[in-house]
Image: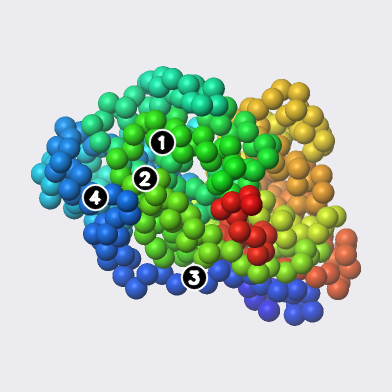
């Protein structure tokens, strides 16, 4: 049987015998009949808020900052932003009063060509700025947890702040989008580190908001900044808009999270001997750092002692420098675990820690462009293609191995039947 997997900007087909295939986990979520109209209708009926146009008319802001995600997030921004900008401009705001801030968090800045690719003509009509987590920050004091909240100066100086993102399961914050455009999106490195440093706390996990200290701190940070309006979309594996939610930053995002939870959650099979997990193609597999998200979900479907085969092109290599350094310097997963517990939270090192937790229990075979290069990850088994990976599986399990295929592992919850918006 041939199963298509996204790989970078391509689609590769995995040939697997029927006797070896334990099943296929697909999302197959249909897009809205008219994606632009879905956004327009949502803006016409916001959740817990006046219409964006009315808010702008009332506030008469001298400047508006629109926060958007970086290139690693697969959001169809052209379809989303045109209706949003129409609301703003018809309220009397001029184009030169609007600026876009790319909420990179601690990621690298986006290039001019990347901005043009994602935002199209808007990149020529408006000013775009990359957030820098080490420069031009304002201290907004301490959050209830004691964390100092450092935020991008341009965001604080803007008379009106709008966030535009997408909602999907997130391994630390429960769900992406919404307040994550503030923290980590436009926060300082110290603030990001203290927030992500709670990754080992009880309640942290995909789909969890209530009782999740990471998520609760993120929401508090967004409230402290004072976001005026939020727009979030849920997308399918084709990066098409399924649903849009807009309005009050907290209320609209939480409503969207509930919808996302219901859409992505599936009744999943028992843990399998082998899981073939796809990161989902560009930009989800732009580097290993980003692909770890899909790997975590895929690993949740594999039995202890089993194998996860991850398809991720990794065209930009391993990714985040500290993450790469930790992986290259370690001789074993245990060494990474020990380093993390001894040094405490280090941004980038935390992803190496999450990866090492999986490696302690399960074998990982990475199918990527890194295979055979000087940048391949020594701690992982590396394969250039499915044929090579399958030979490894046959050597370990024999020709009758059983595998579960998950082409878009980042879009499924690795737990079945559990209500994840609450710990109760």
Q: Residue under label 1, please give it.
A: 222
- From mark 2 to mark 1, how far is it between C-alphas? 8 Å
Q: Compare residues 318 and 308 and report the one nearer the observer.
A: 308
The image's mark for residue 131 is none
**Precedes in sequence: disc 2 or disc 4:** 4
Which mark is first along the chain, 4 or 3? 3
Query: In the image, what residue occupies the spot 54% across and 22% down?
Result: 146
Q: Are marks 1 and 4 in contact (CB under 8 Å)?
A: no
Camera-side mark, 1 or 4:
4
Q: Is 263 on the left-hand or right-hand side of 378?
A: left
Q: Do the residues labelled 2 and 3 touch (CB within 8 Å)?
A: no
Comparing labels 2 and 3, the label whose residue is closer to the camera? 2
Whether label 2 touches label 1, CB < 8 Å: yes
Which residue does the numbered mark 3 point to in the structure image? 29
The crowd level at tag 2 (other Cα within 10 Å; few <14, some 14-19, many 20+) is many
Answer few, some or many: residues within 10 Å of disc 3's Cα (few below 14, many 20 plus, some between 14 and 19): some
* Residue 367 seen in the current view: no
């Amino acid at each position: 049987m041939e199963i298509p997997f996204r790989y970078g900007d391509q689609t590769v087909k995995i040939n697997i015998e029927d006797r070896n295939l334990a099943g296929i986990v697909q999302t197959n979520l249909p897009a809205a009949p008219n994606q632009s109209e879905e956004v327009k209708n949502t803006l016409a009926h916001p959740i817990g808020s006046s219409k964006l146009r009315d808010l702008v008319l009332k506030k008469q802001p001298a400047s508006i900052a629109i926060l958007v995600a970086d290139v690693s997030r697969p959001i169809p921004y052209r379809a989303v932003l045109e209706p949003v900008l129409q609301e703003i401009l018809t309220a009397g705001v001029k184009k030169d009063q609007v600026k876009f801030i790319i909420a990179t968090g601690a990621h690298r800045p986006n290039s001019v060509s990347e901005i043009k690719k994602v935002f199209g003509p808007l990149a020529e009509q408006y000013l775009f700025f990359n957030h820098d987590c080490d420069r031009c920050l304002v201290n907004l004091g301490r959050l209830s947890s004691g964390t100092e909240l450092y935020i991008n100066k341009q965001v604080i100086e803007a008379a009106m702040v709008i966030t535009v993102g997408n909602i999907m399961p997130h391994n630390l914050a429960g769900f992406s989008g919404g307040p994550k455009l503030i923290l980590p999106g436009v926060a300082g490195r110290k603030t990001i580190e203290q927030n992500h440093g709670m990754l080992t706390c009880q309640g942290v996990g995909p789909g969890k908001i209530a009782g999740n200290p990471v998520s609760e701190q993120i929401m508090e940070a967004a409230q402290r900044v004072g976001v005026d309006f939020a727009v979030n979309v849920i997308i399918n594996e084709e990066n098409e808009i399924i649903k849009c939610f807009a309005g009050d930053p907290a209320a609209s995002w939480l409503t969207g999270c509930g919808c996302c939870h219901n859409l992505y959650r599936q009744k999943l099979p028992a843990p399998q001997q082998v899981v073939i997990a796809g990161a989902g193609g560009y930009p989800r597999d732009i580097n290993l750092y980003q692909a770890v998200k899909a790997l975590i979900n895929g690993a949740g479907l594999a039995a202890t002692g089993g194998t996860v085969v991850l398809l991720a092109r990794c065209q930009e290599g391993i990714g985040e420098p500290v993450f790469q350094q930790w992986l290259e310097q370690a001789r074993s997963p245990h060494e990474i675990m020990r380093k993390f517990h001894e040094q405490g939270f280090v941004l980038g090192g935390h992803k190496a820690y999450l990866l090492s937790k999986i490696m302690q229990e399960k074998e990982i075979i990475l199918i990527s462009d890194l295979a055979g290069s000087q940048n391949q990850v020594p701690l992982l088994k590396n394969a250039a293609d499915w044929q090579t990976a399958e030979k490894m599986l046959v050597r370990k399990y024999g020709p009758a191995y059983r595998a579960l295929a998950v082409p878009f592992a980042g879009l499924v919850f690795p737990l079945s039947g559990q209500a994840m918006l609450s710990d109760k």
